[in-house]
């Protein structure tokens, strides 16, 4: 897919929303690892939603959505669909989003067996299966593109900060990031 925000379209700032689905937050940590380059990026992008900012409502229209993590439960699925609906472009960030990675390791087992193992067999004190307040686990863990269309994949566990910076700086410049270039950064 083509992914770009041509500066010629009079789009001086890019709004960005992020979220993590079934991930460890390491991809977001890699985002922060851009360090001083974040100050440069702040001149061009507004982060309007996600764990890096206080605002928790996803605006109706966002230029760029960035999702970390796989789709493992109903809340992940709802978030993925909301991002696809409200974001013009959607990036699948990190191996959990790109191919399922660690969360998808449970796909080798039946969901009932996974739940039994996690909440009863390995628990010494008051083993119990949670029924309230947690999203329902889905039978099979899927990568992000298994449930919604994705415009750009940025692999890696986590993706290197240099790869994330490359993607964002290309978009800010009005260019389409070249996925083949990501390997330059070890992604
Ligand atoms: Fe964590 Fe790696 Fe998954 Fe990112 S890709 S959420 S760093 S396990």
Image (cartoon, grey):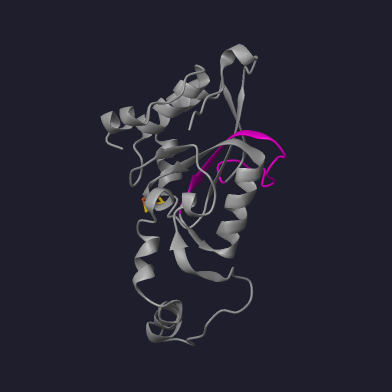
Question: Which quadrant of the figure has residue 132?
Answer: bottom right
- Toward the right, the furthest residue is 60
Question: Which quadrant of the figure has residue 58?
Answer: top right
Q: Residue at x 34, y 65 (%)?
A: 105
Image coordinates for residue 151, horizontal then vertical, percent: 50, 37
Q: Is residue 67 above or below residue 88?
A: below
Nearest the viewer among 130 and 93 is: 93
Q: Residue at x 70, y 46 (%)?
A: 57
Image coordinates for residue 77, horizontal then vertical, percent: 57, 58
Nearest the viewer among 85 and 65 is: 85
- Toward the top, the furthest residue is 8
Q: Residue at x 66, y 47 (%)?
A: 56
Image coordinates for residue 174, horizontal then vertical, percent: 52, 18
Q: Is residue 146 magenta?
A: no
Residue 35 shows in this picture: no
Q: Is residue 149 above or below residue 168?
A: below
Image coordinates for residue 187, horizontal then vertical, percent: 31, 38
Residue 158 shows in this picture: yes
Q: Main secondary structure of the magenta part?
A: loop
Q: Is residue 58 above or below residue 34?
A: below
Q: Is residue 142 above or below residue 53?
A: below
Question: Which quadrant of the figure has residue 115?
Answer: bottom left
Q: Which residues are magenta?
A: 51-69
Q: Residue at x 51, y 29 (%)?
A: 3
């Amino acid at each position: 897919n083509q992914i770009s925000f041509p500066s010629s379209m009079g789009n001086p700032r890019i709004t960005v929303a992020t979220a993590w689905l079934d991930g460890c937050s390491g991809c977001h940590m890699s985002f922060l690892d851009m360090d001083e380059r974040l100050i440069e990026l702040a001149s061009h992008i507004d982060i309007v939603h996600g764990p890096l900012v206080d605002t928790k409502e996803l605006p109706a229209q966002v230029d760029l959505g960035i999702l970390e993590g796989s789709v493992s439960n109903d809340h992940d699925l709802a978030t993925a669909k909301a991002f696809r609906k409200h974001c013009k472009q959607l990036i699948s960030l990190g191996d959990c989003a790109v191919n399922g990675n660690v969360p998808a390791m449970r796909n080798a087992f039946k969901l009932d067996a996974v739940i039994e193992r996690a909440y009863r067999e390995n628990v010494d004190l008051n083993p119990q299966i949670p029924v309230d307040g947690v999203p329902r686990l889905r039978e099979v863990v899927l990568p992000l593109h298994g449930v919604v269309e994705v415009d750009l994949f940025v692999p890696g566990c986590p993706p290197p900060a240099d790869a994330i910076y490359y993607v964002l700086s290309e978009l800010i410049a009005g260019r389409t990031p070249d996925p083949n270039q990501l390997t330059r950064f070890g992604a």
